[in-house]
Structure formats: C-alpha cells, structure tokens
Amino acid sequence: DQQVKQNSPSLSVQEGRISILNCDYTNSMFDYFLWYKKYPAEGPTFLISISSIKDKNEDGRFTVFLNKSAKHLSLHIVPSQPGDSAVYFCAANLQGGSEKLVFGKGTKLTVNP
Amino acid sequence: EADIYQTPRYLVIGTGKKITLECSQTMGHDKMYWYQQDPGMELHLIHYSYGVNSTEKGDLSSESTVSRIRTEHFPLTLESARPSHTSQYLCASSDARILNEKLFFGSGTQLSVL
C-alpha cells in the first residue's frame, strides 16, 4: 500500500511558466518531507525539504507547500527552465533516520523551450 | 558537494554469475544505503548500515548481501544473478549527526541480467 503518492506520472510546461508537482501521503505520522530531482542514468539529488511544523519553504525558484489537513504537498518551480526537465520524487519521513524514508513513484517534468 | 561513487555504471551479465556492485564515499558518513529502482517506480530500500560492521535489511526483500568493513565502502553482492535482478541500484550515504539528514546518492549502477 503506497504511503506516498504522486498521481501524475508526467507534466509538461513551457519555459518561463510555473511547474506544480503534487504529492499526497496517507500516514499522518510523517513529520518531514523532501523533494529529490533525478536525471536519467544519474542518482537523485536533494532539492528542498519541509518540516511538518511549517507550511511553506522557499529556496530560489523552488517553493514547497505543505497542507497537513489534506495530507498534501506541492513543489512549485517558477520560472521553469529546460534544465529543470527531470523526474521529481517526493519523499516522507517518520521521526528518526533516513532509513525510514518513503518515496513516491516520481513525476517526469518536461520543460519545453 | 556529494562525493559518493558507484562502479560500474552499467553492467550486462549472464544468468548465474556472481557480481559485486561497488560504492564508496569520501564524506566520512556513518550511514549508507542501497536502493533499487525500476522505471516509473519508487525507490525501495534493500540494505542499510549504521556504521562499520553494521548491516540491516531494508523494506524490500532482496537476494543480495552487503558488507561494511570500512566506513567509506559498502559493496553489494549477488551470488547468482537472475533476470529478475535487472534494475537500477543506487547507493547513498548520510550524516547521522544531523536531524532529518538528507541522502547523498551515487550515480547508480544499471544492471541487466540476460
């Protein structure tokens, strides 16, 4: 049973526009959330994270929003650039170490020039 | 920047062969991990280690084994490869001293068993 769900396998946006990637989770005990970005034939790289005590975290063009009541988080990329084209994984953690991290299936973002 | 290395990047091998996937990190991280990932699927944790001489099984059952004799080295071994082992294998490490430590991943090994 998937605890972290990314229901959109793919997303296509125009360069300069906003990209919104969504993630839903089922376990209300999750208290820390991360986004990783993965290029083909490469390992994931950390992008941004948010603690459950916050509802927003911003880092440059990337903003993550957390809605605990809806068990939903989203990653906003503004403005989108062709180099942002990659697979984005949402991950959630219970209190404790990263061995408890649960990943979603990822969303493939394509940013068209 | 992360300094974690995996070799080989790609491996095509016949059924029944023994293989070892190498992973090394130069960051001095105590914790290391092996994940398995198929296209369009989640990353699944198959092994992890808290430090030297520590190995634990992850959430996904795997026929592979791991060892941790040195802090920087965490190899994964398949005694007899099968086509069902075809997948991407990702090694990662993290600093256990940091709350909610983030994972640093290697570039992965794409394994194809014929």
Image (cartoon, helix red, strand yellow):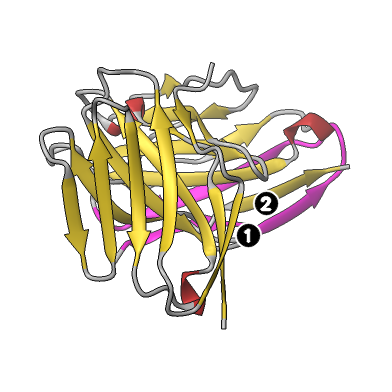
Q: Residue at x 34, y 58 (%)?
A: A76
Residue B94 versus residue B77: which sits nearer the camera?
B94
- The kind of secondary structure element at disc 2 is strand
Tell me the subunit letter for badge 1.
B
Q: Residue at x 65, y 22 (%)?
A: B63
Left or right? Give the position of B94 relative to A19.
Answer: left
**Circle 1 is placed at which residue position?**
B9
In the rendered image, which quarter is residue A44 located in?
A: bottom left
Give the residue furthest to the bottom.
A113
Left or right? Give the position of A93 relative to B13.
Answer: left
Quarter of the C terminus of chain A within the rendering? bottom right
Left or right? Give the position of B78 relative to B2.
Answer: right
Query: Spatial distance from mark 2 to mark 1, Cα to Cα?
Result: 6 Å
Magenta stretch: give its range: B2-27
Q: Is residue B58 above or below residue A110?
A: above
Any mark on residue B110, and which?
2
